[in-house]
């Protein structure tokens, strides 16, 4: 008799737990339906990719319109501005540099302009072997790529001696001269196969500033407020092409109005959920297309040790190579974050795959890269078929080319997959920076 009663009691408890779980799931489903639904997703995406946004090129009236839309959405969601921001605007500047009156002597001999370049935001450059310049000599392409990345935020003046086989790199320099963060340090590039025993370099620098802004909102954590989880996408695109008489606007519906729409939708969802143990940071970056300037500036405003995870969302408007209900994660093998996300999606029919385009180095090409290089489990989620995406960086990247139902499901699944990281029960492993390419 006692055994029978015990079995009845256990059965009752199990049924009770099942009912509680069912109620919780129903509540979660209703919240998803209310905050991340196809109608609202379509409205936001249509707004960001409309012709009146003029392609959202950084520094233009069009992108300022887009910024106002995103800031308003963050305000309506109840997010707080980041500390030190003007409203939701995280303001910063990049500088255009025009080097003038350049004189460069190597081993006492003046060299041609084509064999040198100067990257600086100092109004006057003067360097010789007594002026404390670090001399750097990359011996191969891997070392050169790493060095170029490091010189985005230099910590010293440097003279970089390039073997002439890398002469083509100097052709990139006008773009680097056009867009730079303000820095106290200068980098001088010289193409030479000879040993540099002495150098004497003088130049002037005409500078102009361009003022830009990321849009950032904060949802403070309930029990672990010092730990951060970031959701991000870039809201800039390519602008217009006046020479194209049929269609001059790069609407950028997939790249990356889709990712920015996801960030706005996720902000509403988590604000309504109200169960985020960790502080959530929602960011829309500018100037990604110019070289990741928005995300680079943003990343240096946080202590990377406090960032538990970064979900960067880029181009989720088309179906992946596996079809519906799927996406891929760049740098999947760098941390266990992908495994955690997939565990949270059991029973949904949705799959996160490892990045199938590793030869394109996407892990280092999107807005997750700066934080990932600092050890943060920072990954980009995408569906873009990088070997066969017909509208990528074309004026035809319009909302009519996207699968909006599938895109909305992806946003919902990102919300579900992140929930144990958001509520503090899961913490992804860190990127081993020693293994980074």
Image (tube, helix red, strand yellow):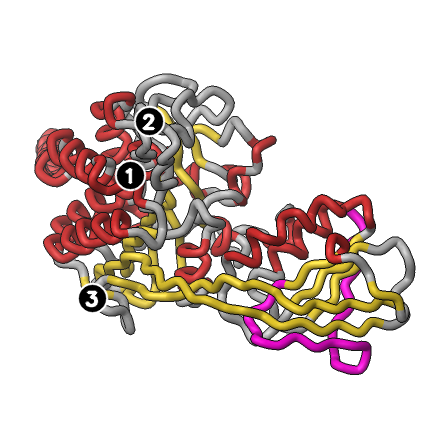
Which residue sits at x=57%, y=33%?
360
Report which residue position mark 1 lands on. Answer: 257
Q: Is residue 192 left or right of residue 32?
A: right
Please name whichever residue, 204 or 148, is drawn nearer the observer in this view of the structure. 204
Give 243 or 83, whichever is nearer the viewer. Answer: 243
Q: How many marks?
A: 3
Q: Residues within 10 Å of mark 3 (few under 14, many from 20)?
A: some
Cβ atoms at labels 1 and 3 below 8 Å apart: no
Residue 10: in sight, yes or no? no
User: Does 384 sit above or below residue 418?
Assistant: above
Real-space Cα distance between discs 2 and 3?
Answer: 39 Å
Q: Residues within 10 Å of mark 2 (few under 14, many from 20)?
A: few
**Residue 87: assigned label:** 3
Q: What residue is rendered at 24% in x and 40% in y?
A: 261
Q: Is residue 288 above or below residue 356?
A: below
Residue 245's disc number: 2
Residue at (57, 74) in percent of width and height:
122
Question: Where in the figure is residue 180, as x and y percent of width and height?
Answer: 51, 61
Q: Read off the magenta span.
A: 119-140
């Amino acid at each position: 008799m006692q055994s029978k009663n015990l079995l009845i009691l256990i059965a009752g408890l199990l049924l009770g737990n099942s009912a509680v779980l069912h109620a919780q799931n129903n509540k979660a489903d209703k919240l998803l339906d209310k905050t991340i639904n196809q109608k609202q997703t379509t409205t936001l995406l249509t707004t960001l990719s409309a012709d009146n946004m003029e392609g959202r090129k950084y520094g233009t009236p069009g992108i300022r319109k887009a910024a106002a839309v995103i800031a308003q959405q963050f305000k309506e969601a109840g997010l707080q501005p980041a500390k030190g921001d003007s409203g939701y605007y995280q303001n910063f500047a990049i500088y255009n540099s025009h080097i003038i009156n350049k004189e460069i002597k190597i081993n006492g001999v003046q060299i041609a302009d084509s064999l040198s370049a100067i990257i600086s935001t100092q109004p006057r450059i003067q360097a010789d072997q007594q002026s404390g310049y670090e001399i750097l000599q990359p011996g191969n392409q891997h070392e050169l790529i790493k060095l170029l990345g490091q010189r985005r935020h230099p910590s010293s003046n440097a003279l970089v001696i390039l073997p002439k086989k890398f002469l083509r790199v100097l052709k990139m320099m006008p773009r680097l001269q056009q867009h730079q963060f303000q820095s106290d340090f200068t980098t001088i590039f010289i193409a030479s196969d000879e040993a540099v025993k002495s150098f004497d370099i003088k130049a002037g620098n005409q500078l102009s500033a361009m003022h830009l802004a990321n849009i950032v909102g904060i949802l403070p954590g309930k029990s672990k407020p010092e730990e951060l989880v970031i959701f991000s996408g870039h809201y800039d695109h390519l602008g217009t092409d006046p020479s194209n008489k049929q269609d001059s606007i790069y609407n950028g519906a997939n790249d990356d109005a889709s990712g920015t729409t996801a960030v706005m939708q996720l902000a509403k969802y988590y604000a309504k959920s109200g169960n985020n143990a960790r502080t959530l940071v929602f960011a829309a970056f500018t100037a990604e297309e110019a070289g990741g300037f928005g995300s680079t500036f943003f990343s240096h405003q946080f202590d990377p040790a406090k960032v538990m995870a970064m979900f960067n969302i880029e181009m989720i408007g088309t179906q992946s190579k596996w079809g519906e209900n799927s996406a891929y994660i760049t740098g999947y093998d760098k941390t266990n974050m992908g495994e955690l996300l997939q565990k949270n999606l059991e029973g949904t029919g949705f799959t996160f795959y490892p990045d199938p385009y590793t030869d394109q180095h996407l892990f280092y090409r999107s807005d997750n890269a700066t934080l990932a290089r600092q050890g943060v489990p920072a990954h980009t989620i995408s569906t873009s078929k990088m070997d066969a995406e017909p509208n990528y960086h074309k004026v035809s990247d319009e909302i009519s080319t996207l699968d909006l139902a599938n895109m909305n499901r992806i946003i919902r699944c990102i919300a579900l997959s992140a929930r144990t990281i958001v509520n503090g029960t899961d913490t992804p492993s860190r990127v081993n920076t020693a293994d980074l390419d």
